[in-house]
Image (cartoon, rainbow, N blue to C red):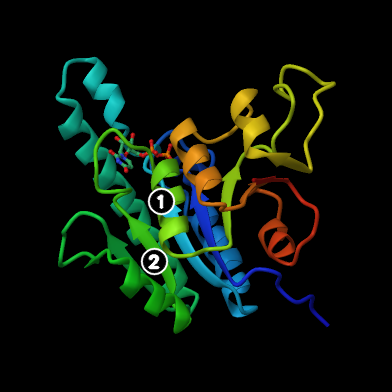
């Protein structure tokens, strides 16, 4: 007997850094396959799965902009980095015999189909994992914000942000051993106390569109499957 999933459609946000593993740069194949396997297991349990991946393991626009590069150009490079990570994830999912589409917010026809919310929903309904690449397609945004936008557009009932920490705490658990983890939290409290692990734009987007946000430790094996079945893991941020 395996527990029944509580959510119909989720959006999983992975940071590029999560793919680093123990490396300083690039993609650790072990991590890639592990995450691909967990996403696929959840999809096979009956949940529709969309994914947004960051690009911080390869490139961040703001870095070169601080040294004089045009920010728009830097951010375009950052968005291309998210496309590279998305292709790596697609490959891993397909190697594990899953069906996966990469839809890109920037037009790169040979690499991935151009993103459209309606097409993405169709693919999700037919059981494909959909990776939304190139962030929002616009500079000055982050992939966290892109994830909240896609989560709302694709009518997901949960946005899951995978982090290195197992939820949201009232203080930094690395600096303060007495820090307490919230099981549940309102967006208002998270925003006011600046507790969010996502930037403000992303948090406000979720709040205004009533998209529940879950924060969990992606290195805890099985956590993803447990959360979609409603287990009390990590922190849920709600309206
Ligand atoms: N980026 C962008 N617009 C978006 C999403 C991302 O310009 O909608 C660029 C930006 O330069 C960012 C880079 O892509 O620094 C990588 O994304 P992010 O830093 O959010 O990745 P993560 O921290 O999740 O690895």
Circle 2 residues within 10 Å: few <14, some 14–19, many ≥20: many
Q: Is residue 93 above or below residue 171?
A: below
- Mark 1 vs mark 2, foreground winner is 1
Which residue occupies 20% across, 54% down? Answer: 106
Res 88 label: none
Question: From the Cβ of disc 1, is ligand 1 less than 8 Å away?
Answer: no
Q: Position of residue 152 (x, y in %)?
A: 46, 57
Circle 1 residues within 10 Å: few <14, some 14–19, many ≥20: many
- Residue behind mark 2: 90
Which residue occupies 44% across, 35% down? Answer: 201
Of the four image quadrants, the one with ligand 1 is top left
Quarter-of-image position of residue 217: top right
- Label 1 secondary element: helix
Which of the image's four quarters has the N terminus?
A: bottom right
Res 149 label: 1
What is the distance, in whole Å, between disc 1 and disc 2 at their CAs?
Answer: 21 Å
* 200 left or right, relative to 187: left
Which residue occupies 60% across, 79% down? Answer: 44
Q: Position of residue 112 (x, y in %)?
A: 24, 66
Which of the image's four quarters has the C terminus?
A: top right
> How many discs mark residues in the rendered view?
2
Q: Position of residue 63 (x, y in %)?
A: 30, 23
Q: Mark 1–mark 2 contact, CB under 8 Å?
A: no
Quarter-of-image position of residue 169: top right
Quarter-of-image position of residue 89: bottom left
* 228 left or right, relative to 155: right
Q: Position of residue 223 (x, y in %)?
A: 71, 56
Q: 200 or 171, which lies in front? A: 200
Q: 8 or 39, which lies in front? A: 8
- Label 2 secondary element: helix
Which residue occupies 42% across, 42% down? Answer: 145
């Amino acid at each position: 007997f395996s527990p029944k999933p509580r959510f119909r459609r989720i959006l999983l946000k992975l940071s590029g850094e999560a793919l680093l593993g123990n490396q300083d740069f690039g993609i650790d194949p072990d991590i890639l396959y592990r995450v691909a396997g967990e996403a696929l297991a959840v999809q096979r349990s009956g949940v529709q799965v969309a994914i947004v991946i960051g690009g911080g393991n390869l490139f961040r626009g703001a870095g070169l902009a601080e040294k004089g590069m045009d920010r728009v150009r830097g951010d375009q490079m950052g968005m291309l980095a998210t496309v590279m990570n998305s292709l790596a994830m697609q490959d891993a999912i397909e190697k594990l015999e899953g069906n996966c589409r990469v839809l890109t917010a920037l037009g790169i026809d040979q690499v991935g189909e151009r993103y459209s919310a309606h097409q993405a929903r169709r693919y999700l309904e037919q059981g494909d994992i959909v990776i939304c690449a190139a962030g929002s397609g616009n500079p000055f945004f982050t992939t966290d914000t892109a994830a909240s936008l896609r989560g709302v557009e694709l009518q997901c009932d949960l946005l899951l942000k995978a982090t290195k920490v197992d939820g949201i705490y009232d203080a930094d658990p690395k600096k303060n051993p007495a820090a307490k983890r919230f099981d549940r939290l309102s967006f208002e409290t998270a925003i006011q106390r600046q507790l969010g692990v996502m930037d403000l734009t992303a948090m406000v987007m979720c709040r205004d569109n009533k998209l529940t946000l879950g924060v969990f430790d992606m290195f805890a094996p099985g956590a993803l499957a447990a959360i979609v079945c409603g287990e009390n893991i990590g922190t849920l941020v709600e309206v």
